[in-house]
Image: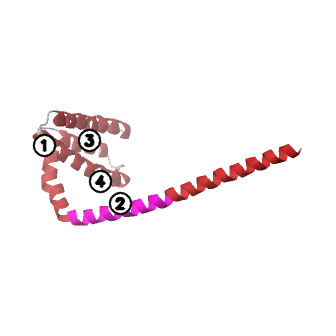
Amino acid sequence: MITALVYRLLVLTGGTLYPAYQSYKAVKNKDVKEYVRWMMYWIVFAVYIAAETICDMFFSWFPFYYEAKLILIIYLVNPWSRGSSALYRNWVHPWLVNHEREIDRLLDSSKSKFYNQFTKLFSRGLIFARDVVATAAIRSSELNSSQKID
């Protein structure tokens, strides 16, 4: 059985760094076929990471859980199995096509809400910083005045 740390190191190298380098090579060489292959991988990998985050809370205690996840990553990355392409074409792409409008609406709404909240928080932060600086200036002035009197 492998530990969570060993699993993370293997996924970092084999599931992230290797595909990142292969993606770089596809872009550098303008290889559209490889570019599409690695784009499908990254989309499936993003779905995997999202699902993994939730599944880890419930299943991490199962025997050979990390080994099973590692086998899945190998299946996704392996150029012979084309696992990420198969999962993308059979599951992810059809689901995205069916839910694209809902996802776009949710993203637009979320962007707007995030921007509004960020603006409010930033404004409050500026007001707080202004008040802190003003208070410090007043106290400094009062301290200087009291020292001159003594």
Residue at the location (38% across, 38% down)? 5
Between marks 3 and 4, how big is the CA–CA gap? 14 Å
Let me know if residue 35 appears in the view.
yes
Alpha carbons under labels 1 and 2: distance apart:
34 Å
Q: Is 68 or 14 nearer to us in this picture?
A: 14
Q: Choose the circle earlier in sequence order: 3 or 4.
A: 4
* Colour pattern: secondary structure
Label 4, label 2: how far apart the Cα atoms are = 23 Å
Of the two numbered discs 4 and 1 on the same chain, state the one appearing first in sequence: 4
- Counting other residues with Cα less than 10 Å from the Cα at mark 4, is it few (<14), some (14-19), or many (20 or more)? few
Local secondary structure at mark 3: helix
Q: Label 1, on which residue?
A: 82
Bounds of the magenta span?
100-121
Queried whether the magenta region covers residue 103, the answer comes back as yes
- Circle 4 sits in a helix, a strand or a loop, which is it? helix
| Disc number for residue 111 | 2
In the image, residue 118 lies at what x, y percent?
45, 58
Residue at the spot 78% in from the left edge and 50% down from the top edge: 142
Q: Which residue is mark 3?
A: 70
